[in-house]
Amino acid sequence: GNTRPVTVCGNKNWSEKNKFQTSFFPFSITQRTSIMSIPPWLTLTGANGAVTAVEFVQGQRSDCLVVGLENGLVMCWNLSTKKVIWQQKERKGNKVQGIKAFSNHEQDTLVAIMTRNDVFQVYNLTNLVGKQPLLGEEVACSDEGSGEEGELLVMFPSMEFEMAIHSLSFCPLLLTRTQSREYCFGYASSENTFSVMRAGQWTPVKITNEKQGMVMTAELFSSEGCSYAFIGYESGYVIFYSLDYSDGGNDGDKVLLQPKKLLELSVSEGPVVSMGYSKTKRTLAIGAADNKLRFFTVSKVIGDKDNGSEVSVTLKLVKEVETKDVMVSQISVRDGAVCCFACSFADNITRVFSHKGRPLADLEGHADSVVSLTHSAPLQHVSLSVVETRTHIPGVLLATGSKDCTVCLWSLYNGNIGEANTTQKE
Protein backbone atom coordinates (compact mmCIF):
# COMPACT_ATOMS: atom_id res chain seq x y z
CA GLY A 1 0.00 0.00 0.00
CA ASN A 2 2.87 2.42 0.68
CA THR A 3 5.14 1.25 -2.13
CA ARG A 4 5.07 2.22 -5.78
CA PRO A 5 7.01 0.98 -8.81
CA VAL A 6 10.00 2.94 -10.02
CA THR A 7 10.93 3.23 -13.67
CA VAL A 8 14.57 2.55 -14.42
CA CYS A 9 15.47 4.43 -17.57
CA GLY A 10 17.27 2.54 -20.26
CA ASN A 11 16.30 0.34 -23.19
CA LYS A 12 12.62 0.57 -24.15
CA ASN A 13 12.51 -3.22 -24.09
CA TRP A 14 13.69 -3.19 -20.50
CA SER A 15 13.15 -6.37 -18.49
CA GLU A 16 14.29 -7.87 -15.21
CA LYS A 17 16.71 -10.08 -17.13
CA ASN A 18 18.68 -7.31 -18.77
CA LYS A 19 18.22 -4.42 -16.34
CA PHE A 20 21.89 -4.26 -15.37
CA GLN A 21 22.97 -4.05 -19.00
CA THR A 22 20.56 -1.25 -19.85
CA SER A 23 20.53 0.78 -16.65
CA PHE A 24 24.02 0.79 -15.20
CA PHE A 25 26.97 2.46 -16.88
CA PRO A 26 30.51 1.32 -15.90
CA PHE A 27 32.24 4.66 -16.46
CA SER A 28 35.25 5.77 -14.47
CA ILE A 29 36.82 9.22 -14.80
CA THR A 30 39.87 8.60 -12.65
CA GLN A 31 42.30 9.02 -15.56
CA ARG A 32 40.53 11.51 -17.81
CA THR A 33 42.82 14.07 -19.40
CA SER A 34 39.94 16.09 -20.84
CA ILE A 35 36.36 16.89 -19.90
CA MET A 36 34.11 13.90 -20.55
CA SER A 37 30.33 13.69 -20.82
CA ILE A 38 29.20 10.98 -18.41
CA PRO A 39 25.76 9.31 -18.49
CA PRO A 40 23.98 8.41 -15.24
CA TRP A 41 24.61 5.06 -13.55
CA LEU A 42 20.89 4.86 -12.73
CA THR A 43 17.85 7.10 -13.21
CA LEU A 44 14.81 6.96 -10.93
CA THR A 45 11.48 8.31 -12.13
CA GLY A 46 7.97 8.27 -10.72
CA ALA A 47 7.99 11.55 -8.80
CA ASN A 48 5.08 13.90 -9.52
CA GLY A 49 6.99 17.13 -8.91
CA ALA A 50 10.35 18.82 -9.05
CA VAL A 51 12.91 17.07 -6.81
CA THR A 52 14.05 19.88 -4.51
CA ALA A 53 15.97 17.85 -1.88
CA VAL A 54 17.94 14.59 -1.89
CA GLU A 55 19.72 12.76 0.95
CA PHE A 56 21.27 9.31 1.30
CA VAL A 57 20.14 7.46 4.44
CA GLN A 58 22.42 4.53 5.18
CA GLY A 59 22.14 2.07 8.07
CA GLN A 60 23.28 -1.38 9.13
CA ARG A 61 20.53 -3.04 7.08
CA SER A 62 20.15 -1.06 3.85
CA ASP A 63 21.20 1.96 1.78
CA CYS A 64 18.32 4.29 0.90
CA LEU A 65 17.74 7.63 -0.82
CA VAL A 66 15.19 10.08 0.59
CA VAL A 67 13.92 12.76 -1.78
CA GLY A 68 11.68 15.76 -1.24
CA LEU A 69 9.47 17.33 -3.87
CA GLU A 70 8.26 20.83 -4.58
CA ASN A 71 4.69 19.77 -3.71
CA GLY A 72 5.67 18.62 -0.20
CA LEU A 73 5.89 14.88 -0.89
CA VAL A 74 8.77 12.94 0.73
CA MET A 75 9.74 9.55 -0.75
CA CYS A 76 12.26 6.96 0.45
CA TRP A 77 13.84 4.62 -2.14
CA ASN A 78 15.55 1.38 -1.19
CA LEU A 79 18.56 1.35 -3.52
CA SER A 80 18.80 -2.47 -3.50
CA THR A 81 15.20 -3.13 -4.57
CA LYS A 82 14.80 0.17 -6.51
CA LYS A 83 11.38 0.63 -4.89
CA VAL A 84 9.78 3.32 -2.77
CA ILE A 85 9.38 1.90 0.73
CA TRP A 86 7.90 4.97 2.42
CA GLN A 87 6.31 8.23 1.42
CA GLN A 88 4.88 11.12 3.40
CA LYS A 89 2.98 14.22 2.24
CA GLU A 90 3.72 17.29 4.32
CA ARG A 91 0.42 18.67 5.54
CA LYS A 92 0.54 22.09 3.84
CA GLY A 93 2.07 20.80 0.62
CA ASN A 94 4.91 23.32 0.78
CA LYS A 95 8.23 22.81 -0.99
CA VAL A 96 10.68 20.51 0.77
CA GLN A 97 13.65 22.83 1.35
CA GLY A 98 16.09 20.34 2.80
CA ILE A 99 16.63 16.80 4.13
CA LYS A 100 19.49 15.68 6.39
CA ALA A 101 20.28 12.29 7.94
CA PHE A 102 21.87 11.97 11.39
CA SER A 103 21.78 9.80 14.51
CA ASN A 104 21.20 10.09 18.25
CA HIS A 105 23.14 8.63 21.18
CA GLU A 106 21.24 5.33 20.78
CA GLN A 107 22.54 5.09 17.18
CA ASP A 108 19.01 5.42 15.76
CA THR A 109 18.85 6.58 12.14
CA LEU A 110 17.06 9.93 12.04
CA VAL A 111 16.07 12.22 9.17
CA ALA A 112 15.35 15.94 9.51
CA ILE A 113 12.97 17.44 6.93
CA MET A 114 12.43 21.18 6.47
CA THR A 115 9.63 22.61 4.33
CA ARG A 116 9.54 26.19 3.06
CA ASN A 117 7.79 28.54 5.50
CA ASP A 118 6.21 25.64 7.37
CA VAL A 119 7.81 23.07 9.66
CA PHE A 120 11.03 21.35 10.73
CA GLN A 121 10.40 17.65 11.46
CA VAL A 122 12.55 14.73 12.60
CA TYR A 123 11.59 11.15 11.67
CA ASN A 124 13.07 7.91 12.99
CA LEU A 125 13.90 5.59 10.04
CA THR A 126 15.66 2.89 12.05
CA ASN A 127 12.93 0.36 11.18
CA LEU A 128 13.64 0.93 7.49
CA VAL A 129 17.43 1.03 7.28
CA GLY A 130 18.72 -0.22 10.64
CA LYS A 131 20.79 1.53 13.27
CA GLN A 132 23.93 3.53 12.59
CA PRO A 133 27.26 1.70 13.10
CA LEU A 134 29.46 2.75 15.99
CA LEU A 135 32.69 4.60 15.22
CA GLY A 136 35.15 2.07 13.82
CA GLU A 137 32.52 -0.66 13.51
CA GLU A 138 32.45 -2.53 10.20
CA VAL A 139 29.12 -3.24 8.53
CA ALA A 140 28.58 -6.56 6.77
CA CYS A 141 28.21 -5.92 3.04
CA SER A 142 25.06 -7.26 1.42
CA ASP A 143 23.11 -6.61 -1.77
CA GLU A 144 19.95 -8.25 -0.50
CA GLY A 145 16.83 -6.51 0.73
CA SER A 146 15.77 -6.64 4.35
CA GLY A 147 13.70 -9.46 5.74
CA GLU A 148 13.51 -13.20 5.10
CA GLU A 149 11.62 -14.56 2.13
CA GLY A 150 7.92 -14.77 2.92
CA GLU A 151 8.26 -12.54 5.98
CA LEU A 152 5.80 -9.64 6.13
CA LEU A 153 7.48 -6.50 7.41
CA VAL A 154 5.29 -3.56 8.42
CA MET A 155 7.64 -0.64 9.02
CA PHE A 156 6.61 2.98 9.36
CA PRO A 157 8.89 5.81 10.48
CA SER A 158 7.83 7.62 13.64
CA MET A 159 7.99 11.38 14.14
CA GLU A 160 10.43 12.31 16.91
CA PHE A 161 10.21 16.11 16.86
CA GLU A 162 8.41 19.00 15.18
CA MET A 163 8.72 22.78 15.28
CA ALA A 164 7.31 25.63 13.21
CA ILE A 165 9.62 27.71 11.03
CA HIS A 166 8.93 30.72 8.85
CA SER A 167 11.73 30.82 6.31
CA LEU A 168 11.27 32.20 2.80
CA SER A 169 14.97 32.08 1.92
CA PHE A 170 16.59 30.00 -0.81
CA CYS A 171 19.09 28.57 1.70
CA PRO A 172 18.79 24.79 2.16
CA LEU A 173 18.92 22.87 5.45
CA LEU A 174 22.50 22.26 6.65
CA LEU A 175 24.11 19.84 9.11
CA THR A 176 27.52 19.23 10.65
CA ARG A 177 28.88 16.75 13.18
CA THR A 178 31.73 17.25 15.65
CA GLN A 179 34.22 14.58 16.68
CA SER A 180 32.10 13.91 19.77
CA ARG A 181 29.13 13.11 17.50
CA GLU A 182 27.30 16.31 18.38
CA TYR A 183 25.08 17.44 15.50
CA CYS A 184 24.40 21.06 14.65
CA PHE A 185 21.75 22.21 12.15
CA GLY A 186 21.66 25.47 10.24
CA TYR A 187 18.91 27.15 8.24
CA ALA A 188 17.72 30.61 7.18
CA SER A 189 14.96 31.51 9.63
CA SER A 190 14.15 34.83 7.92
CA GLU A 191 15.42 36.87 5.00
CA ASN A 192 18.46 38.27 6.84
CA THR A 193 18.77 35.78 9.72
CA PHE A 194 20.60 32.45 9.82
CA SER A 195 19.80 30.15 12.74
CA VAL A 196 21.84 27.30 14.19
CA MET A 197 20.64 24.76 16.75
CA ARG A 198 22.04 21.70 18.45
CA ALA A 199 20.25 18.41 17.79
CA GLY A 200 18.34 17.30 20.87
CA GLN A 201 18.06 20.79 22.35
CA TRP A 202 16.37 22.37 19.30
CA THR A 203 16.84 25.92 20.60
CA PRO A 204 17.79 28.19 17.68
CA VAL A 205 20.58 30.73 18.07
CA LYS A 206 20.13 33.53 15.53
CA ILE A 207 22.75 35.32 13.42
CA THR A 208 21.17 38.50 12.04
CA ASN A 209 22.90 40.79 9.55
CA GLU A 210 20.58 43.37 8.00
CA LYS A 211 23.46 45.15 6.24
CA GLN A 212 24.23 42.30 3.82
CA GLY A 213 20.65 41.56 2.72
CA MET A 214 19.06 38.14 2.30
CA VAL A 215 20.79 34.94 3.41
CA MET A 216 21.26 33.05 0.13
CA THR A 217 23.35 30.02 1.08
CA ALA A 218 25.61 28.66 3.82
CA GLU A 219 28.04 25.87 4.63
CA LEU A 220 28.61 24.22 8.02
CA PHE A 221 31.64 22.15 8.98
CA SER A 222 33.45 20.94 12.09
CA SER A 223 37.17 20.77 12.79
CA GLU A 224 39.11 19.78 15.92
CA GLY A 225 35.97 19.67 18.05
CA CYS A 226 34.64 23.09 16.97
CA SER A 227 31.94 23.98 14.45
CA TYR A 228 32.03 26.80 11.90
CA ALA A 229 29.68 28.44 9.41
CA PHE A 230 30.26 30.20 6.10
CA ILE A 231 27.19 32.32 5.24
CA GLY A 232 26.68 33.85 1.78
CA TYR A 233 24.54 36.95 1.33
CA GLU A 234 22.63 38.82 -1.35
CA SER A 235 25.25 41.59 -1.19
CA GLY A 236 28.01 39.29 -2.49
CA TYR A 237 29.65 39.02 0.93
CA VAL A 238 30.66 35.83 2.77
CA ILE A 239 30.90 35.94 6.57
CA PHE A 240 32.71 33.23 8.56
CA TYR A 241 31.51 32.41 12.11
CA SER A 242 32.68 30.09 14.86
CA LEU A 243 29.99 28.14 16.72
CA ASP A 244 31.08 27.65 20.33
CA TYR A 245 29.59 25.54 23.10
CA SER A 246 29.62 25.86 26.89
CA ASP A 247 28.74 23.48 29.70
CA GLY A 248 25.72 25.45 30.81
CA GLY A 249 22.98 22.85 30.98
CA ASN A 250 21.59 21.48 34.24
CA ASP A 251 22.02 17.95 32.92
CA GLY A 252 25.64 18.52 31.93
CA ASP A 253 24.72 19.02 28.26
CA LYS A 254 26.59 21.53 26.15
CA VAL A 255 24.78 24.72 25.17
CA LEU A 256 25.32 26.55 21.88
CA LEU A 257 26.55 30.11 22.42
CA GLN A 258 26.14 33.18 20.24
CA PRO A 259 28.37 32.67 17.14
CA LYS A 260 31.48 34.84 16.79
CA LYS A 261 32.38 36.57 13.52
CA LEU A 262 35.88 35.67 12.30
CA LEU A 263 35.88 37.04 8.73
CA GLU A 264 33.80 39.27 6.46
CA LEU A 265 34.79 39.36 2.79
CA SER A 266 33.28 40.57 -0.50
CA VAL A 267 33.69 37.75 -3.02
CA SER A 268 31.29 38.70 -5.82
CA GLU A 269 29.57 41.65 -7.48
CA GLY A 270 26.31 39.71 -7.36
CA PRO A 271 24.56 37.55 -4.74
CA VAL A 272 26.36 34.46 -3.43
CA VAL A 273 24.17 31.56 -4.58
CA SER A 274 25.93 28.32 -3.58
CA MET A 275 28.86 27.08 -1.50
CA GLY A 276 30.72 23.84 -0.81
CA TYR A 277 33.65 23.21 1.55
CA SER A 278 36.29 20.46 1.62
CA LYS A 279 37.89 19.90 5.02
CA THR A 280 40.64 17.66 3.66
CA LYS A 281 41.75 20.22 1.05
CA ARG A 282 40.68 23.33 3.00
CA THR A 283 38.97 24.57 -0.15
CA LEU A 284 35.79 26.63 -0.39
CA ALA A 285 33.91 26.75 -3.71
CA ILE A 286 31.50 29.65 -4.23
CA GLY A 287 28.95 30.06 -7.02
CA ALA A 288 27.59 33.56 -7.57
CA ALA A 289 24.99 35.38 -9.63
CA ASP A 290 27.74 37.04 -11.69
CA ASN A 291 28.09 33.65 -13.46
CA LYS A 292 31.44 32.81 -11.91
CA LEU A 293 32.59 29.84 -9.85
CA ARG A 294 35.43 30.68 -7.46
CA PHE A 295 37.72 28.36 -5.51
CA PHE A 296 39.39 29.65 -2.33
CA THR A 297 41.89 28.07 0.03
CA VAL A 298 41.02 28.56 3.69
CA SER A 299 43.85 29.16 6.13
CA LYS A 300 44.08 27.28 9.38
CA VAL A 301 42.32 28.90 12.29
CA ILE A 302 45.01 30.82 14.19
CA GLY A 303 45.07 31.24 17.94
CA ASP A 304 44.09 29.36 21.07
CA LYS A 305 40.65 30.04 22.50
CA ASP A 306 41.57 28.45 25.85
CA ASN A 307 44.38 30.96 26.31
CA GLY A 308 42.31 33.90 25.10
CA SER A 309 44.41 34.58 21.99
CA GLU A 310 42.89 35.88 18.79
CA VAL A 311 41.23 33.52 16.33
CA SER A 312 41.29 34.46 12.64
CA VAL A 313 40.98 32.98 9.17
CA THR A 314 41.87 34.08 5.64
CA LEU A 315 40.60 33.19 2.16
CA LYS A 316 42.90 33.13 -0.88
CA LEU A 317 41.46 32.98 -4.40
CA VAL A 318 42.91 29.99 -6.28
CA LYS A 319 40.79 29.77 -9.43
CA GLU A 320 37.97 31.73 -11.03
CA VAL A 321 35.85 29.85 -13.58
CA GLU A 322 33.63 31.68 -16.07
CA THR A 323 30.34 29.77 -16.25
CA LYS A 324 29.17 31.11 -19.63
CA ASP A 325 25.97 32.91 -18.60
CA VAL A 326 24.71 30.00 -16.46
CA MET A 327 24.61 30.13 -12.68
CA VAL A 328 25.81 27.44 -10.25
CA SER A 329 22.75 26.73 -8.12
CA GLN A 330 24.03 23.91 -5.86
CA ILE A 331 27.41 22.44 -4.84
CA SER A 332 28.08 19.07 -3.20
CA VAL A 333 31.56 18.02 -2.05
CA ARG A 334 32.91 14.50 -1.96
CA ASP A 335 35.60 14.67 0.71
CA GLY A 336 38.26 12.23 1.86
CA ALA A 337 40.74 10.15 -0.16
CA VAL A 338 38.91 11.33 -3.27
CA CYS A 339 37.98 15.03 -3.30
CA CYS A 340 35.81 16.64 -5.98
CA PHE A 341 33.16 19.33 -6.26
CA ALA A 342 29.89 18.53 -8.06
CA CYS A 343 28.23 21.77 -9.25
CA SER A 344 24.74 21.98 -10.75
CA PHE A 345 24.41 24.56 -13.53
CA ALA A 346 21.29 26.25 -14.90
CA ASP A 347 21.81 24.55 -18.31
CA ASN A 348 20.69 21.15 -16.84
CA ILE A 349 24.29 19.86 -16.58
CA THR A 350 26.17 18.97 -13.40
CA ARG A 351 29.88 19.65 -13.76
CA VAL A 352 32.60 18.07 -11.63
CA PHE A 353 35.73 20.00 -10.63
CA SER A 354 38.90 19.21 -8.72
CA HIS A 355 39.69 21.17 -5.55
CA LYS A 356 41.93 23.40 -7.68
CA GLY A 357 39.08 24.29 -10.02
CA ARG A 358 40.11 21.99 -12.87
CA PRO A 359 37.06 20.68 -14.81
CA LEU A 360 36.85 16.89 -14.75
CA ALA A 361 33.50 15.78 -16.18
CA ASP A 362 30.07 16.87 -17.41
CA LEU A 363 27.11 14.86 -16.10
CA GLU A 364 24.22 15.00 -18.58
CA GLY A 365 21.04 13.14 -17.74
CA HIS A 366 18.34 15.71 -16.96
CA ALA A 367 15.91 17.56 -19.22
CA ASP A 368 15.53 20.51 -16.82
CA SER A 369 17.50 22.35 -14.14
CA VAL A 370 19.18 20.39 -11.34
CA VAL A 371 18.00 21.90 -8.05
CA SER A 372 19.39 19.43 -5.49
CA LEU A 373 22.42 17.14 -5.21
CA THR A 374 24.37 15.21 -2.58
CA HIS A 375 27.04 12.52 -2.19
CA SER A 376 26.57 9.25 -0.31
CA ALA A 377 28.86 7.66 2.23
CA PRO A 378 30.54 4.43 1.02
CA LEU A 379 27.77 2.00 0.05
CA GLN A 380 27.48 -1.16 2.13
CA HIS A 381 24.39 -2.88 0.66
CA VAL A 382 24.44 -1.84 -3.02
CA SER A 383 27.00 -3.16 -5.48
CA LEU A 384 28.32 -0.97 -8.26
CA SER A 385 29.35 -4.03 -10.28
CA VAL A 386 27.90 -4.19 -13.80
CA VAL A 387 29.21 -7.64 -14.63
CA GLU A 388 28.36 -9.86 -11.66
CA THR A 389 25.66 -8.44 -9.41
CA ARG A 390 26.34 -10.90 -6.60
CA THR A 391 29.84 -9.49 -6.18
CA HIS A 392 29.90 -6.49 -3.89
CA ILE A 393 31.72 -3.54 -5.48
CA PRO A 394 31.72 -0.71 -2.94
CA GLY A 395 31.78 2.95 -3.81
CA VAL A 396 30.15 6.35 -3.47
CA LEU A 397 27.21 7.70 -5.47
CA LEU A 398 26.22 11.25 -6.37
CA ALA A 399 22.46 11.94 -6.51
CA THR A 400 21.02 14.83 -8.53
CA GLY A 401 17.39 15.91 -8.35
CA SER A 402 15.81 17.99 -11.09
CA LYS A 403 12.78 19.99 -12.10
CA ASP A 404 12.16 17.23 -14.67
CA CYS A 405 10.88 15.06 -11.75
CA THR A 406 13.74 12.55 -11.95
CA VAL A 407 16.72 11.58 -9.81
CA CYS A 408 19.97 10.53 -11.45
CA LEU A 409 22.63 8.52 -9.63
CA TRP A 410 26.23 8.82 -10.78
CA SER A 411 29.18 6.53 -10.04
CA LEU A 412 32.42 8.53 -10.19
CA TYR A 413 35.92 7.76 -8.90
CA ASN A 414 34.92 4.30 -7.73
CA GLY A 415 37.80 2.47 -9.41
CA ASN A 416 41.31 2.16 -8.08
CA ILE A 417 41.79 4.66 -5.25
CA GLY A 418 45.48 4.99 -6.12
CA GLU A 419 44.51 6.15 -9.60
CA ALA A 420 42.04 8.60 -8.09
CA ASN A 421 44.70 10.00 -5.78
CA THR A 422 46.99 10.50 -8.77
CA THR A 423 44.30 12.63 -10.38
CA GLN A 424 43.83 14.62 -7.17
CA LYS A 425 47.54 15.50 -7.06
CA GLU A 426 47.19 16.96 -10.54
Image (cartoon, grey):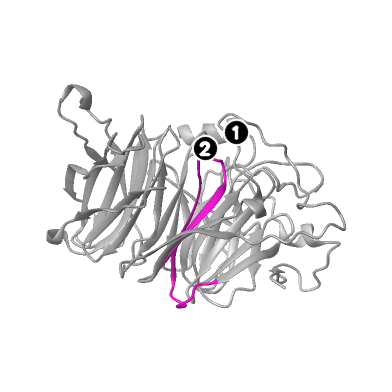
Q: Position of residue 418 (x, y in %)?
A: 59, 30
Helix, strand or loop at mark 1: helix
| Cα distance between the residues tagged 2 and 1 | 8 Å
Which one is in front, 187 or 312? 187
Q: Position of residue 348 (x, y in %)?
A: 48, 68
What residue sits 83% from the left and 67% below the top? 15
Give the answer, above or below, for where 326 lies relative to 38.
Answer: below
> Residue lying furthest left in this view?
211
Please state if 82 lies on the left or on the right of 231 as rendered.
right
Which one is in front, 11 or 315? 315
- Name the residue tied to disc 1: 417
Q: Position of residue 43 (x, y in %)?
A: 64, 64
Position of the N terminus, as image quadrant, is bottom right
- Indicate yes or no whether the magenta region holds residue 403: no
Give the answer, above or below, for where 210 lies relative to 312.
Answer: below
Q: Quadrant of residue 193?
A: bottom left
* Cβ atoms under marks 2 and 1 closer than 8 Å: yes
Q: Earlier in the sequence, mark 2 or mark 1?
A: 2
- Name the residue tied to disc 2: 338
Magenta-colored span? 89-115
Q: Quadrant of residue 236?
A: bottom left
Q: Amino acid at mark 2?
A: Val
